Image (cartoon, rainbow, N blue to C red):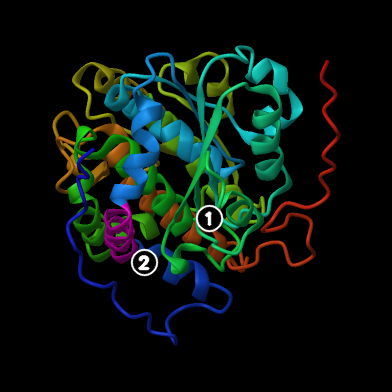
Amino acid sequence: MKTAAPETAAPEAADDRQSVPQGAAHTSREIRHQPRLWAETATRLGKERDSLDAFLAPLLAEPRLRIVLTGAGTSAYAGQIARSALARATGRSVVAVATTDITADPTGCFEESGRPTLLVSFARSGNSPESLAATEIADQLLDRCAHLVITCNADGTLATRHQDRANSHVLLTPPESEDQGFAMTSSLTCMLLAALLSLGGDQVRGLAGCPAAAASLLSGDVTDRVTELTGRGPDRFVYLGSGALQALAGESALKLLELTGGAVTALSDSSLGFRHGPKAFLTPRTAVVVYVSNDPYTRQYDLDIFRELSAALPEGHVVAVAARPDGLPADRTWLVDGMADADDAALALPAVLCAQLVALNASLACGVRPDNPFPDGEVNRVVQGVTIHPLQTR
């Protein structure tokens, strides 16, 4: 499968250490170096394209192949964002199921034990208990299961357990993508890109333009607009989108909760689903970000909710993140240049930087240190306190 590699982007601007607030150095750097790391991710994948294709080809030749995209937290959103694009690209059944769901309800997630399955595991560290349990449960319940492990940590338990297995392939993103900050930023996008390139290739439109689009966002006026939005002092945020961009909305809300240490409440939903109860979340101090789809049909629903909420909330509290300006007011649109013809899964790569910047700014405005928003350890970078119970099968 040919790989639509991202175009090489210039390295991110060096951080001015005196201008980065204390406790934000890792998170700030890890947001800004994503364009460069995406180009490195594509280069790494290109070098192992032959071995990867040798692993994937016999699996993708199976008409009944089921591809399960899995991860926990942000890693689960990677699978949800990629799902529909990979289903179209491969012509196979693709589902996104969190490792937390597989671990807690294994027979419900793997009802067809005889169906050939490729389990694609996303993991920043590869040391989360559910990440390990999900692969073991799959092997226990499924008659034919292969594993594609996409991880940022070559020394993580998930990578080392699968490195030399005949039915596994470990795909490593650049070492710098293993974020040192609390929240997943470049780890998410590098793993998502790796999945789209490895299983979708040039069937996923727009991947080549992602680094330039992200670099443009980071150097353009969107950063000022983010500061303007968070400067209005919203005490809650709503993120909305449709399809792949609904999953992006979920990740965006999670990022805000994480980096502000829960000080700013966040909610996500689909553009149509929001009216069915969750709209009660709105107050005059709510900010709303609507991700607008590139699909002409889906886009109509995103524009509808954008207009409706713009009329209901104070001026400037509702913004759109979009790759095309048509139907949107310029002063309330954060434009993702160069992605007008991209699949929404590819658009999500640069678009998520908007959410990361919002979360970073909101965290600092709350007096929270985004590199470690939970200094008392209530929430941990690698989840703790999970007991994996033995699965009894007949």
Query: Residue 294: percent from the left, percent from the top?
Result: 22, 29
Quadrant that contains the C terminus: top right
Query: Residue 269: percent from the left, percent from the top?
Result: 49, 26
Closest to the observer, 116 or 320 = 116
- Would you say residue 47 sits in the magenta stretch? yes
Q: Main secondary structure of the magenta part?
A: helix
Residue at 37%, 19% in the rendered image? 92
Above or below, 248 relative to 17: above
Note whether residue 313 is visible: no
Residue at 82%, 28% in the rendered image? 391
Residue at 85%, 33% in the rendered image? 390
Determine the residue located farthest toward the front in the rendered image: 166
Above or below, 257 relative to 142: below
Of helix, strand and loop, which one carries label 1?
Answer: loop
Q: Quadrant of residue 363?
A: bottom right
What are the residue bounds of the magenta stretch? Answer: 35-48
Above or below, 69 relative to 302: below
Q: Amino acid at mark 1?
A: Met
For residue 184, the mark is: 1
Which is more N-terminal, label 2 or label 1? 2
For residue 64, the mark is: none
Query: Residue 133: percent from the left, percent from the top?
Result: 72, 39
Q: Amino acid at mark 2?
A: Arg
Closest to the observer, 254 or 148 = 148
Q: Using residue 117 as the reference point, say whether residue 369 is left or right of it.
A: right
Badge 2 is on which residue?
32
Closest to the observer, 113 or 27 = 113
Q: Using residue 76 as the reference point, say whether residue 176 is left or right of it.
A: left
Of helix, strand and loop, which one carries label 2?
Answer: helix
Q: Quadrant of residue 381?
A: bottom right
Residue at 26%, 73% in the rendered image? 11
